[in-house]
Image: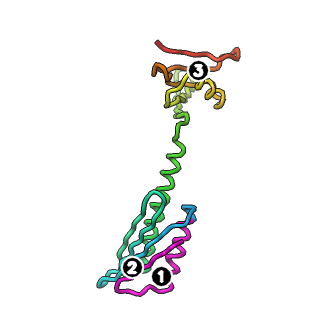
């Protein structure tokens, strides 16, 4: 943890340093790595301003708050930074999860006439692949059916597991 303080028309007390260090420890715990921080504290008439800049992987996070009390300005600025860190972590997780995996979007609807339940699971591969690659993918996922786009013709095809144990291929015209 590397903290730089700048004070303009004010004095940085040990209490303010403790608050900053405690809050930065929680932010580092969220991120999982040490961060470089710059805290700029200033007083202008009746306004007490706290500006916090944190350098993280991929950019910087800034927050500034002004109230009549320096402690509350710091608290509000750190709350805003923590919220943004959590949002960035969530975005990163979502990006990692998306990747080139099979997209699944299950939806359920009821058919009142027959009383049977229709469960639709849309499984498809977003990237084009050959039949051999699709076969390997089908066997590795332990699914019964795979819809994919063929790499040689850019047309859709379906691989499915037959009742006799073989693999069936459907290529629409």
Q: Residues within 10 Å of mark 1 (few under 14, many from 20)?
A: some
Q: Which residues are magenta?
A: 1-28
Look at the numbered discs 3 and 1 and tell me whether their residues touch, using CB distance below 8 Å.
Answer: no
Q: Is residue 101 above or below residue 113?
A: below
Q: CA distance from mark 3 to mark 1?
A: 64 Å
Relative to the observer, which residue lies in front, 91 or 121? 91
Q: Is residue 125 above or below residue 88?
A: above
> Which residue has dot 3 on it?
159
Look at the numbered discs 2 and 3 and tell me whether their residues touch, using CB distance below 8 Å.
Answer: no
Sooner in the amino-acid sequence: mark 2 or mark 1: 1
Residue 60: x %, y % from top left: 42, 62
Q: Residue furthest top?
A: 173
Relative placement, left or right, of 140 versus 86 is right
> Which residue has dot 1 on it?
16
Q: CA distance from mark 2 to mark 1?
A: 10 Å
Residue 157: x %, y % from top left: 52, 19
- SS at badge 1: helix
Q: Residue at x 54, y 75 (%)?
A: 22
- SS at badge 3: strand
Q: Residue at x 53, y 76 (%)?
A: 21
Q: Residue furthest left?
A: 45
Residue 11: x %, y % from top left: 41, 87
Q: Residue at x 43, y 66 (%)?
A: 80
Relative placement, left or right, of 157 versus 138 is left
The magenta stretch spans residue 8 = yes
Residue 7, image quadrant: bottom left
Q: Quadrant of the N terminus?
A: bottom right
The magenta stretch spans residue 9 = yes
> Which residue has dot 2 on it?
41
Sooner in the amino-acid sequence: mark 2 or mark 3: 2
Look at the numbered discs 2 and 1 and tell me whether their residues touch, using CB distance below 8 Å.
Answer: yes
């Amino acid at each position: 943890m590397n903290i730089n303080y700048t004070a303009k028309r004010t004095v940085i007390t040990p209490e303010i340093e403790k608050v900053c260090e405690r809050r930065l420890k929680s932010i580092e715990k969220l991120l999982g790595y040490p961060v470089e921080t710059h805290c700029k504290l200033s007083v202008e008439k009746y306004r007490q301003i706290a500006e916090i800049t944190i350098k993280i992987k991929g950019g910087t996070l800034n927050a500034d708050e002004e109230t009549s009390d320096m402690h509350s300005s710091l608290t509000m600025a750190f709350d805003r930074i923590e919220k943004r860190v959590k949002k960035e972590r969530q975005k990163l997780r979502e990006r990692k999860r998306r990747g080139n995996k099979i997209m699944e979007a299950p939806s359920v609807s009821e058919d009142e006439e027959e009383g049977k339940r229709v469960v639709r699971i849309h499984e498809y591969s977003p990237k084009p692949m050959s039949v051999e690659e699709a076969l390997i993918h089908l066997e590795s996922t332990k699914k019964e059916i795979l819809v994919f786009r063929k790499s040689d013709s850019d047309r859709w095809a379906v691989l499915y597991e037959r009742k006799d144990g073989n693999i069936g291929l459907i290529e629409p015209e």
